Image: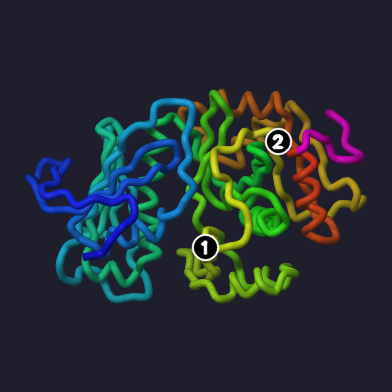
């Protein structure tokens, strides 16, 4: 039998979707301020859960942690059409339910009201562990946490220091991941490089801190030979867009992970524009333009509960554009100044 940390074998595990009882193993994880219970009779599926969430810093938020249940069910046989990747997920919602469907044997059904989800996968889906984890398991975790704790879901990155965090937003390809990675390699705490969640009342940011996804051409920007080797020896994943990236496990890095949620004290839009003055990479965003800029950058989050409170907090905090310097280390230093409560040289309020 596979042994899982924080796991317990249950003789009879109730099926939350009313299909009786089955012998199952339960894995328990503290994630995103919630207590998750993963239940399955398949050790293979729970191995994927452990690979994704084992040793992730257990974040707690200033509220009672809800108990959230995810059941994973393995369907015998092959059901997927032949190809290099499974069908894309089609989203459906209604009557308080959210569904992500690849096909009749590979789907996730989520009920935030009942604080539970069902994930069904066929045996041939096991050949696509990245898609299974990223598009089904992670989707269920993120939706349940966001809906049940009232978190604002963001596409962005975040690094910090001494419990304080700076939010890194910007278009795809602007350099958020590269900046977050270099922050990790140069002494900042790493929280997230792709998806994070903010409790709007406290402005605490949390995430599942497990992987960083790096393009091969970004390796040339890394000075440390050990870090280059750690990333280049990592598995390669292929996004739906066709872009291939190294999936480097930050839990196996030598950097510091955010052990608890970070209190946001700054926020920047990362952009590809080079600064004329290398000593002034930060340029304040006009206060009257912050709300529109945020909504354009985060269209999904802007439609979720808690957005207006979060948006107002960032308007009051003030935001910057972070332009590129001669070396990424200069960008890390600019973020560090925000974390220390200092404004960028040459900046003035607008």
| Residue 293 numbered mark, or none | none
Q: Residue under circle 2?
A: 266
The colour mode here is: rainbow
| Relative image position of residue 112 (x, y in whole percent) | 31, 34
- Along the viewing direction, whichever of 271 and 2 lies nearer the viewer: 2
Q: Is 96 placed left or right of 258 in the picture?
A: left
Foreground: disc 2 or disc 1? 1
Callout 2: helix, strand or loop?
A: strand
CA–CA distance between discs 2 and 1?
Answer: 26 Å
Q: In the rendered view, tell whether residue 259 sits above or below residue 266.
A: below
Question: Is 286 colored magenta in this rendering?
Answer: no
Q: Is 264 placed left or right of 57 in the picture?
A: right
Circles 2 and 1, Cβ within 8 Å, touching? The answer is no
- Residue at 52% in and 40% down: 206
Q: In the rendered view, tell whether residue 288 sits above or below residue 86.
A: above
- Along the viewing direction, whichever of 49 and 300 lies nearer the viewer: 49
Which of marks 1 and 2 precedes in the sequence?
Answer: 1
Q: Residue under circle 1?
A: 249
- Residue at 83% in and 36% down: 343
The C terminus lies in which quarter of the figure?
Answer: top right
Residue 174 visible from this viewpoint:
no
| Relative image position of residue 26 (x, y in whole percent) | 24, 50
**Magenta span covers which residues?**
340-350
| Relative image position of residue 76 (x, y in whole percent) | 15, 67
Q: Residues within 10 Å of mark 1 (few under 14, many from 20)?
A: some
């Amino acid at each position: 039998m596979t042994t899982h940390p924080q796991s317990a074998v249950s003789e009879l595990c109730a099926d939350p979707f009313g299909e009786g009882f089955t012998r199952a193993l339960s894995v328990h994880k503290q994630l995103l301020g919630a207590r998750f219970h993963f239940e399955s009779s398949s050790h293979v599926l729970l191995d994927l859960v452990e690979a994704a969430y084992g040793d992730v810093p257990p974040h707690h938020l200033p509220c009672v942690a809800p108990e959230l249940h995810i059941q994973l069910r393995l369907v015998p046989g092959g059901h997927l059409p032949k190809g290099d990747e499974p069908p894309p997920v089609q989203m459906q919602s209604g009557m308080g339910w959210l569904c992500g469907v690849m096909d009749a044997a590979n789907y996730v059904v989520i009920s935030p009201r009942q604080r539970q989800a069902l994930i069904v996968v066929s045996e041939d889906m096991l050949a696509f562990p990245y898609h299974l984890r990223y598009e089904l398991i992670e989707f269920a975790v993120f939706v349940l946490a966001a809906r049940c704790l009232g978190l604002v879901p963001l596409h962005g990155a975040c690094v910090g220091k001494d419990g304080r965090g700076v939010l890194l937003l910007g278009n795809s390809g602007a350099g958020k991941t590269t900046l977050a990675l270099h922050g990790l390699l140069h002494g900042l705490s790493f929280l997230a490089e792709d998806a994070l969640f903010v409790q709007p009342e406290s402005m605490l940011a949390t995430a599942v801190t497990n992987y960083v996804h790096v393009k091969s051409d970004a390796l040339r920007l890394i000075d440390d030979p050990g870090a280059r080797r750690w990333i280049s020896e990592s598995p390669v994943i292929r996004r739906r867009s066709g872009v291939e990236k190294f999936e480097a496990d930050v839990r196996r890095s030598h950097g510091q992970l955010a052990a608890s949620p970070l209190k946001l004290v700054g926020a920047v839009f990362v952009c590809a524009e080079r600064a004329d003055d290398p000593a002034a990479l930060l340029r304040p965003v006009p206060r009257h333009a912050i709300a529109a800029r945020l909504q354009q950058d985060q269209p999904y989050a802007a439609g979720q509960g808690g957005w207006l409170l979060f948006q107002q907090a960032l308007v009051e905090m003030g935001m910057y554009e972070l332009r590129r310097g001669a070396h990424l280390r200069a960008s890390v230093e600019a973020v560090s100044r925000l974390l220390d409560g200092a404004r960028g040289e040459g900046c003035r309020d607008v």
